[in-house]
């Protein structure tokens, strides 16, 4: 008899439907995937691994013998905050396809800023026909803040397209072809150089509010920001002030403190902001499901768990 793996999710109905279709196919012959609400008390008690996507913590707590949970999202800050420290281990979704998808988005929106698309869009609204000087990518410095797998893949793609790329991380890292900085002093040095800042770090206690009014004061005049990380890494009032004051030229925002972005948010009407509905690197269901299946199959065969989140670091 195949073991039962609960699926616990409070994600959108469309997302849950996609996973409910893909996961049973990927885990066929390994385990039976069942929605949490259909589990019997005995099945909840016997479960040692669950698949989760934005789960209700009380439902996770209702399975007392869970050893680990497989997140379907790369970001796990809500899980680390809401699940007890002595609760199940948390395994992030690490999909190589996600790094490729993110690097594609970073390149696309870096080019959007590099080619002055926001300025030309504003001119269109004003019916202005005027060209502007075009810099070479080599004359544009793009700083990647966060040098994990997503950051490194994005940096390499930018370099292959001719951009001057530098990188920053909280702890020291050495990478080929990328000048790297770390720590608070390193961050200040990066902000002073960057024409485009790309945020790709996880949300932790150390990165929450990292880009505040003090950080923006250190930015190169006219710099632009792309936030593909998490909303709370940027202090929104400080960002708006820096944009309205001309310190920053533009912000491409894919993530926000509250999602969906509330209709009353001043970001919607700010002409120096491009708003995206959290689409920079959507999970590819087919590839992610196979990774989840491989992790769970290996666990049931050997008892070995995939690498889990360091709860102190938050990733």
Image (cartoon, helix red, strand yellow):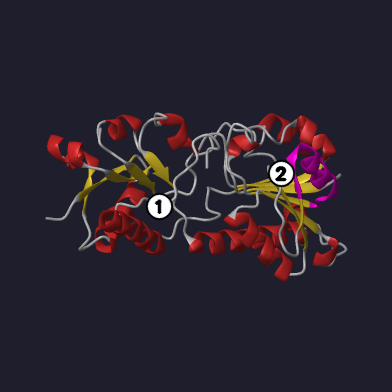
According to the picture, the residue beneath numbered tag 2 turns out to be: 271
Percent coordinates x, y for residue 246 in the rendering: 83, 40
Q: Height in image: 270 above or below 284?
A: above
Image point 73% across, 58% down: which residue?
A: 117
Q: Secondary structure at mark 1?
A: loop
Callout 2: helix, strand or loop? Answer: loop
Q: Where is mark 1, residue-wise?
A: 306
Q: Which residues are magenta?
A: 181-195
Indicate left or right for 294 with 101 as reference.
Answer: left
Q: Residue 280 vs residue 161: left or right?
A: left
Q: Which of disc 1 and disc 2 is earlier in sequence?
A: 2
Which sits in the foreground, 27 or 68?
68
Q: Give me the residue at 43% from left, 60% from top.
A: 284
In the image shown, does 99 or 269 lie closer to the viewer?
Answer: 99
Badge 1 density bin: few <14, some 14–19, many ≥20, Cα 10 Å: some
Instruction: State the count of labels.
Output: 2
Judging depth in this view, the residue of 106 and 149 nearest the camera is: 149
- Relative height, residue 251 to residue 281 (above, below): above
**Percent of width and height locating residue 147:** 65, 52
């Amino acid at each position: 008899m195949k073991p039962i793996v609960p699926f616990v999710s409070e994600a959108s109905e469309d997302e849950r439907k996609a996973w409910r279709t893909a996961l049973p196919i990927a885990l066929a012959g390994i385990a039976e995937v069942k929605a949490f609400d259909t589990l019997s008390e005995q099945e909840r008690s016997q479960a040692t691994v669950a698949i989760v996507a934005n789960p209700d913590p009380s439902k996770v707590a209702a399975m007392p013998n869970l050893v680990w949970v497989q997140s379907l999202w790369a970001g796990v800050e809500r899980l680390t905050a809401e699940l007890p420290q002595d609760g199940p281990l948390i395994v992030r979704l690490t999909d190589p396809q996600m790094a490729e998808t993110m690097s594609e988005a970073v390149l696309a929106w870096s080019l959007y800023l590099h080619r002055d698309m926001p300025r030309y869009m504003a001119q269109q609204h004003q019916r202005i026909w005027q060209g502007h000087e075009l810099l070479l990518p080599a004359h544009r410095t793009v700083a990647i803040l966060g040098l994990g797998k997503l950051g490194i893949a994005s940096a390499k793609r930018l370099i292959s397209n001719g951009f001057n790329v530098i990188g920053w991380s909280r702890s020291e890292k050495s990478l080929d072809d990328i000048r790297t900085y770390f720590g608070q002093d390193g961050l200040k040095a990066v902000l002073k150089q960057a024409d485009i800042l790309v945020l790709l770090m996880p949300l932790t206690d150390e990165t929450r509010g990292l880009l505040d009014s003090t950080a923006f004061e250190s930015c190169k005049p006219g710099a632009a920001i792309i936030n593909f990380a998490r909303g709370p890494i940027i202090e929104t009032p400080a960002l708006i002030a820096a944009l309205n004051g001309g310190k920053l030229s533009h912000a491409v925002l894919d993530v926000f403190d509250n999602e969906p972005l509330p209709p009353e948010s001043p970001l919607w009407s700010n002409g120096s902001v491009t708003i995206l509905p959290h689409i920079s690197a959507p999970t590819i269901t087919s590839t992610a499901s196979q990774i989840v299946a491989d992790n769970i199959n290996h666990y049931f065969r050997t008892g070995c768990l995939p690498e889990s989140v360091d709860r102190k670091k938050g990733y």
